[in-house]
Amino acid sequence: MTKQTRLIVTGLDSAYFDFGLDLIRSIAGAAPAPERMGVLDLGLTPDERARLQAMNITTVAPGWDYPFMNDERAPRWFQAMTARPHLPRHFPGFATYVWIDADAWIQDWAPVQTLIEASEGGALAIVEERLVGIDAEIEDADGTRRRFALDPAQATAQNEADWRAVFGDPIADAIGRLPYFNCGVFALRGESPAWSAWSRCLHDCLHRPFRKTAEQQALNICIRRGEIAVAPQDIAANFLFTNELPAYDEARARFVVPEDGRPIGVLHLCDLKRLRRIVFPRWGGGLGIRLSPRFRA
């Protein structure tokens, strides 16, 4: 059977359904041609499932990919993490799989296309995080305004402490202060051996103290050990709002990378996704601009 070219996959439950619709609509608006999509059903209602299927989106309830995992050990949404190294099994028949977290949306297709093309040689196309820091005014959903700050040195120290608490000194000393390769956005060929390497490492990680980012820690261990070949991508392919804020270019009505103004492809809202507005730096200087971080059609 001839494999179809690619599938874009995300994971949704009812709490993330509206974010997922933003992602789906943003892909439809940015991609030059219609894209096939699949959704891991992590607790959708029948109506939500029907809405996705009406858009020709395949939904799959993955269950627990490891027999020792169950609903007592972890919440159902964690199946998005245990299923991620097994996307070719849940959605068979595609040459390439592109994962995008549901709390992200696509502004510009070019970095996504570059990500996909970079995976064609068999390597994992993925973005290595950078911790720049944040000091900005944010507005909560109820209208409350407050400061939000991220100190990169403190964040790096916390990451190292997390590695040490779960994996002990040898791994923490080796990779604890290195930036994460963020698995919220990636592209990988279906026949790549990276899937099985990731699955084996996640199996081991799940026997350690619970971390909601276990799949990302497992992936990074594999990468740093040289078990998974990587094609590192530009930050525009997965711009994480909890590490730094983008600038906003009013003339182009685009979020841009702050240092040079190139358009961002994937805006990954992370923990800032439920904010009403953020005061973003204005490209070219001047006072900040207060905007919603959410997708706007």
Image: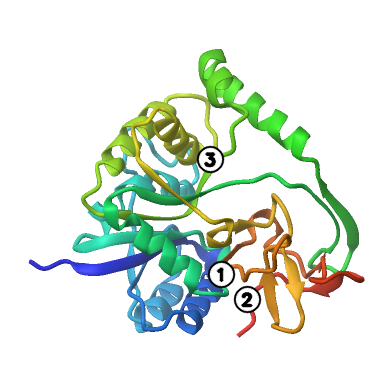
- In the rendered structure, are the residues bearing label 3 and label 1 in contact, judged by CB atoms less than 8 Å apart? no
Residue depicted at 43% across the width and 64% down the height: 114
Nearest the eye: 68 or 122: 122
Please tell me the numbered disc located at residue 105: 1
Q: Secondary structure at mark 3?
A: loop
- In the rendered structure, are the residues bearing label 2 and label 1 in contact, judged by CB atoms less than 8 Å apart? yes
> Image height check: is 10 above or below 168?
below
Residue that label 3 marks: 213
Residue depicted at 31% across the width and 43% down the height: 65
Nearest the eye: 209 or 282: 282
* Residue kind at label 3, given as amino acid type: Thr
| Percent x, y of residue 34 | 36, 82
Q: Secondary structure at mark 1?
A: strand
User: Of label 3 and label 1, which has the lower sequence position?
Assistant: 1
Residue sitting farthest toward the top = 169
Residue depicted at 54% across the width and 56% down the height: 234
User: Of label 3 and label 2, which has the lower sequence position?
Assistant: 3
For this view, does 280 lie left or right of residue 85? right
Q: Secondary structure at mark 2?
A: loop
Residue that label 2 marks: 295
* Residue kind at label 2, given as amino acid type: Phe
- Few, some or many residues within 10 Å of mark 1 (<14, 14–19, 20+): many
| Percent x, y of residue 30 | 49, 80
Residue 115 seen from this side? yes
Query: Can you tell which quarter of the image residue 254 is in?
Result: bottom right
User: Of label 2 and label 1, which has the lower sequence position?
Assistant: 1
> Image height check: is 105 above or below 237?
below
